[in-house]
Image: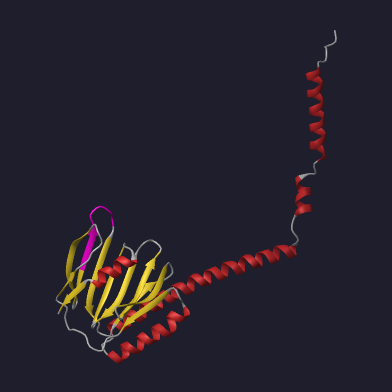
């Protein structure tokens, strides 16, 4: 007794036969590898490009670390140097060589012909809303005050000290915008960083002001304008 062939059975059989024919027509994997493998010349050129890119990246990283190490050594030597002529010469070397070769750091120097020997205190006539005084202490011949926000993890710090012609500050400008500004006839440097941290470094009447924190730049300027120091 012969089995009756249905339409579904015929379609299934034809599909399997077509599938087998298609798979048998595909070349062997080893033949495909030979046919589509790159030429030795292309392999050499690709390897050369990869080697050059890796070498350039490593060289850039190495130069960055050399720059930062050199800057740190020069700053330490300057601070430890007792002779003012040597200190001045080292600062000039720092600003004219390391800063020009590697632009990841800038130096800010302040100058004053006459300066007070001691700053005993200062008052802050204006402070951004939400910040309260949390700490104050002597900072060498100057004064340090720290203000913290009552609800958020933010702060504003103020350091005022005599501008004794030996102040040098290293600032990472890789992620910052640095602007020279004039406030009431006094030249200063304003640093605005991408994460919301801002800093003002300015000299006035022989004193150096350093105001920084997580407040807007215009707020830092307002704080500076309302500060009164006592000698």
Q: Compare residues 68 and 147 and report the one nearer the observer.
A: 147
How far across and down, in percent of the image, does residue 160 sit? 22, 75
Residue drawn at the location 57% of the way across and 70% of the way down:
55
Q: Left or right: where does residue 53 sit relative to residue 178?
A: right
- Is 5 located above or below residue 151 in the figure? above
The number of callouts visible is 0
Q: Compare residues 129 and 231 and report the one nearer the observer.
A: 129
How far across and down, in percent of the image, does residue 32 sit? 77, 49
In the rendered view of the protein, which quadrant contains the C terminus? bottom left
How far across and down, in percent of the image, does residue 48 sit? 65, 68
Q: Among all residues in the image, which is located at the extreme bottom?
A: 85
**What is the magenta range?**
145-153
Q: Among all residues in the image, which is located at the extreme right?
A: 2
Q: Which of the 4 quarters of the picture holds residue 118?
A: bottom left
In the rendered view of the protein, which quadrant contains the N terminus? top right
Q: Which of the 4 quarters of the picture holds residue 91?
A: bottom left
């Amino acid at each position: 007794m012969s089995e009756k062939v249905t339409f579904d059975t015929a379609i299934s059989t034809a599909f399997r036969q077509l599938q087998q024919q298609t798979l048998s027509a595909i070349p062997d994997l080893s033949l495909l590898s030979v046919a589509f493998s790159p030429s030795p010349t292309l392999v050499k050129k690709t390897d050369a490009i990869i080697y050059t890119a890796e070498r350039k990246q490593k060289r850039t990283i190495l130069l960055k670390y050399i720059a930062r190490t050199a800057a740190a050594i020069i700053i330490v030597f300057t601070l430890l140097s007792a002779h003012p002529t040597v200190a001045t010469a080292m600062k000039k070397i720092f600003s004219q060589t390391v800063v020009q070769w590697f632009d990841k750091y800038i130096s800010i120097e302040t100058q004053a012909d006459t300066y007070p020997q001691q700053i005993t205190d200062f008052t802050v006539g204006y402070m951004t809303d939400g910040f309260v005084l949390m700490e104050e202490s002597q900072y060498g011949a100057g004064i340090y005050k720290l203000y913290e926000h009552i609800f958020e993890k933010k702060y504003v710090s103020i350091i005022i000290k005599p501008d004794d012609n030996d102040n040098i500050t290293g600032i990472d400008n890789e992620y910052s915008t640095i602007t020279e500004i004039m406030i009431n006839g006094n030249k200063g440097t304003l640093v605005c960083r991408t994460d919301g941290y801002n800093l003002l470094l300015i000299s006035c009447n022989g004193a150096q002001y350093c105001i920084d924190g997580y407040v807007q730049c215009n707020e830092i300027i307002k704080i500076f304008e309302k500060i009164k120091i006592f000698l």
